[in-house]
Amino acid sequence: MLDRQQRTVLWVLISAQLAISGTYLMAKIGLREFTPLSFGFYRFLLAGLVFVALMAARGQLRLPQPGDRKQFLWLALLVVPLNQGLFLYGMKYTLASHGALFYSTTPILILVLSCLFLGERPTAPKVLGIALGFAGVLLVLSDRGLGLSRDTLMGDGLILVAVATWALYTILSKRLLTRYPPLYVTGFSLAAGFLFFVPVGLPAALRQDYAAVTRAGLASLLYLALLTSVLGYLIWNWGLSKLEASKVSVVSNLQPIIAAMLGWAFLGEPVTARFALGAALAMAGVFLTERG
């Protein structure tokens, strides 16, 4: 059972999903006007500057302890060049609802990684939950039939790899949050991650066609930089510092429902029966995994 403080933390995490679920819609809008690499460059430039300012204001603008620097560099590499590079390229080609559904399987991947690296023992409900979750993902992948465009399949595949890097980021963050505050872990990883991204992001930013960028594109950039990367990532790591990783990650189950509704309302993305069934299987899989 969760105590009162833990329930409060969980409700804050759940409330944050309302903003985070809009990430997939806003990414689709922004990627109509920005290239993925230029979009990522400006997104993490803005987020990095905000975090540097916040860390300086809190007296946290310093290097990690020597023994932890390698882990922080891995954290930075995972969260920006790998996770978000794959995410932005994937979202350019797939549906907003698909991206949200695949990210909702994060608890299952975290369980698998916990069993492999943290010695957690699998149980029958957990194994069944993992099977149901992946069955749901496979059903969604076939949502439009095996003959759907290669671009959409490629986008789905990139998102799935991005989810794996996010699960790794979550587990590594959990370890570091026992020794560093959430603002420091989030801010250092995002700011250092931006530096890793510069070699590929800066050339793309210089080649970007800025005449094609509208207010909607700029709004989507600000949304992902400030609400997703600053507020969303900070709340995620704050929650990890208070609760077990599996309890934090399970709130991402809300994202497919909200994202599918937003995609249908603003982008005209269809919500098919196959997608709904796949989403239900994936949600059931996560529920069983958590119960197990």
Image (tube, rainbow, N blue to C red):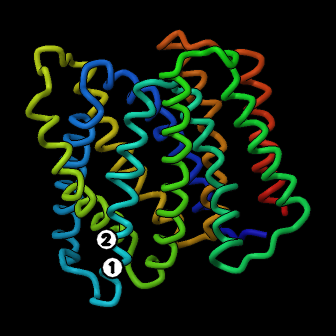
Q: Quadrant of residue 227?
A: top left
The answer to whether residue 227 is above or below residue 237 is: above
Which residue is rendered at x = 63% and y = 70% of the image? 244
Q: What kind of residue is marked 1?
A: Lys
Q: What kind of residue is marked 2?
A: Leu
Q: Quadrant of residue 67?
A: bottom left
**For mark 1, what is the residue?**
70
Disc count in the image?
Answer: 2
The answer to whether residue 253 is above or below residue 267 is: below
Asked whether residue 5 is in view, the answer is no
**For mark 2, what is the residue?**
73
Q: Residues within 10 Å of mark 1 (few under 14, many from 20)?
A: few
Q: Residues within 10 Å of mark 2 (few under 14, many from 20)?
A: some
- Residue furthest top in the image: 268
Picture coordinates of residue 191 (x, y %)?
Answer: 23, 60
Q: Is residue 105 left or right of residue 237?
A: right
